Image (tube, rainbow, N blue to C red):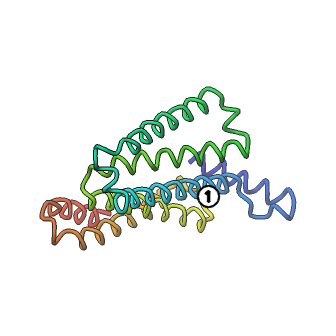
Amino acid sequence: MYYQEDTERQAAFYDQAEPSYKGFNPRLGFVRKVYSIVSVQLLVTTLMVMLCMGPLRSVLLYPQHTFPFVLFILASITALILCIAVACYPEVGRRVPTNYFILGLFTLCEAYTVGYITVFAEPVDVLLAAALALSMTLVLTIYAFTTKTDFTTWGAFLWIAGWGLLAFSLLFFVISPRTPAFTPLVIIISVVTIII
């Protein structure tokens, strides 16, 4: 409730300030920017997972190839160091060219780390999880770009819950005939869909 009033107050301020600010909402702009960045990060991670599950799978699985494991360790350590650096020196994360470089490097390190770990899992499960995460984030980004209301309301929750149920249902419809283990999950999803 407070956020809704605060957003309306900010929008009213910008509407009265200058004609060039008409309809400008700084909080909504921030939400759009954040969801765009997260969508790009998940897209890069999904592409890296697909690369590791596809052409690089045979190279990553054989123990005689030590370079992928060393790269995995370096990527994990680099991602941890970047997180600690931004946490300890927040001004570094606020400088515009530097923060995008740090974010890009962090995204590449995490994407390789996730890609390397997923090589040892079932490919269908990994691609299902990656596709659902990317799908949910892209839909949230589209919602953030198309809405004029505050994003933290119940309408946004119901919208994304509906999309999530639709995406799960479509994916389980394709996978379920081949995998009988998903039958209880399909029943749970059906019950949640009826409740919503």
Residue nearer the viewer, 64 or 114: 64
Taking the view exactly as shown, the residue that stands out farthest to the left is 180
Up-down relation of residue 179 to residue 75 (above or below): below
Q: Say which quarter of the image contains residue 54.
A: bottom left
Image coordinates for residue 180, horizontal then vertical, percent: 12, 64
| Residue in view at x 79 percent, y 56 percent | 14
Taking the view exactly as shown, the residue that stands out farthest to the top is 88
Q: Is residue 66 visible?
A: yes
Image coordinates for residue 128, horizontal then vertical, percent: 31, 61
| Residue in view at x 60 percent, y 61 percent | 149
In the image: residue 65, left or right of residue 86: left
Image coordinates for residue 25, horizontal then vertical, percent: 71, 57
Q: Secondary structure at mark 1?
A: helix
Please name the amino acid that badge 1 sits on.
Arg
Q: Say which quarter of the image contains residue 58.
A: bottom left
Residue nearer the viewer, 80 or 63: 63
Q: Say which quarter of the image contains residue 177.
A: bottom left
* Residue on which disc 1 sits: 32
Q: Is residue 132 visible?
A: no
| Residue in view at x 48 percent, y 40 percent | 75
In the image: residue 157, left or right of residue 166: right
Residue nearer the viewer, 47 or 27: 47
Label 1 neighbourhood size at 10 Å, few (<14), some (14-19), many (20+)? many
Image coordinates for residue 12, horizontal then vertical, percent: 75, 56
